[in-house]
Structures are given as C-alpha cells and as structure tokens.
Amino acid sequence: MSTDEACSTFLVRHAWLSLRGVVAEALVEHDLSVAQFASLLLLRESPGMSVADVARKVSTARQSANEMLGGLERAGLVERRQHPTDRRSQQIMLTPLGLERLEAALPTVQAVEARLSAGFSEADLAVVSTWLHRMAGASAGVNEEISTL
C-alpha cells in the first residue's frame, strides 16, 4: 500500500503544495503572495473580518496574519477600522485599490486552475469539490470538539 492509499491527508497536502507553488509563480506578476491573495478574496466576501478571523481562514498564526495584513495595509490594499462595538478589536476592510488588485489577479489564478484541471471531466471536478467541502466541514466540527476537551 502506497502512502497515498494509506493516508488521503498526505495526498491532499502534496496536491496543495504543488498547486500553491504554481499559483505563487502566477501571482508574482500581481505582486501578491498566495496568502495575500486569499486574504483579499476573503475580505471581499466577508468585509470587516478581524485579524483572528483572517488567520483562521488562511490557516496561519494570528501574528503571521497580522504581519501579512500589515504589508497589505502599507500597500494600500486593506485598511483597519475600529470595531463599532468592541474597542479592542479592529475590522479589516478591502480598499478600492485592494479590490482592483484582486480583480486583476483572479483571472490569473482561475487560468492556472483551469490549465491544471483540463484533463478532468466536469463530473470528476464536482466530486472533488464536494469531497473537499465535506471534509473541510467535518474537520471544522472535529476541531471544535477537540477544543472543548
């Protein structure tokens, strides 16, 4: 039994690292890292996220997310605003320049994904998408159970 057959986690990690490398190369022309691109995408979908929210969604430590968001802020792509009801918290917002940069980079990432998935049928891709979404949801539930122990 190969490592891939014994542990789907290893195979998913290997696929992610391979895909991340190709996407990172493509994002160079937009002066964005994969984590920065993901953060801009998240902030477009959910404006006002906290640093902790962004860190959780991009699977990094809060300190790393704060540093990464600081770079985006210095570049004028995001801004921090005081939370309206929690004085200790800040909301992270995409700026018009950040939205412009995201919209310029998005077709590049989509083209990479289309190129890499060209040999798969729509049915294959639907199954993979369903599996990944279900695993992410199931994993979130397991993580919540573990944190309550």
Image (cartoon, rainbow, N blue to C red):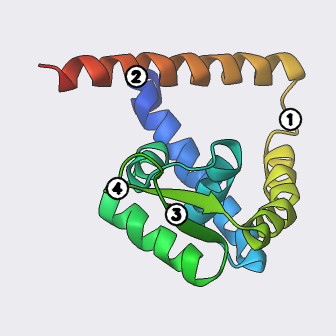
Q: Residues within 10 Å of mark 4 (few under 14, many from 20)?
A: few
Amino acid type at circle 3 is Arg
The residue wearing badge 4 is 87
What kind of element bears circle 2? helix
Earlier along the polypeptide chain: callout 4 or callout 2? Answer: 4
The residue wearing badge 1 is 119
List x then y, in percent, for residue 9: 42, 31
Relative depth, front residue between 39 and 47: 47
Q: Answer yes or no: do the residues labelled 2 and 1 have beta carbons within 8 Å?
A: no
Q: Is residue 75 left or right of residue 60?
A: right
Q: Residues within 10 Å of mark 3 (few under 14, many from 20)?
A: few
Q: Answer yes or no: do the residues labelled 1 and 4 have beta carbons within 8 Å?
A: no
Q: Whole-Å distance between the Cαs marked 3 and 2? A: 31 Å
Earlier along the polypeptide chain: callout 1 or callout 3? Answer: 3
What kind of element bears circle 1? loop
List x then y, in percent, for residue 115: 86, 49
Label for residue 81?
3
Q: Residue at x 40, y 24 (%)?
A: 140
Relative depth, front residue between 143 and 92: 92
Earlier along the polypeptide chain: callout 1 or callout 4? Answer: 4
Q: Answer yes or no: do the residues labelled 1 and 3 have beta carbons within 8 Å?
A: no
What kind of element bears circle 4? loop
Mark 3 or 4, which is nearer the eye? 4
The residue wearing badge 2 is 139
- Extreme residue in the bottom direction: 74
Amino acid type at circle 2 is Ser
Q: Whole-Å distance between the Cαs marked 3 and 4? A: 10 Å
Q: Is residue 9 left or right of residue 145?
A: right
What kind of element bears circle 3? strand
Earlier along the polypeptide chain: callout 3 or callout 2? Answer: 3
Amino acid type at circle 1 is Gly
Label for residue 11?
none
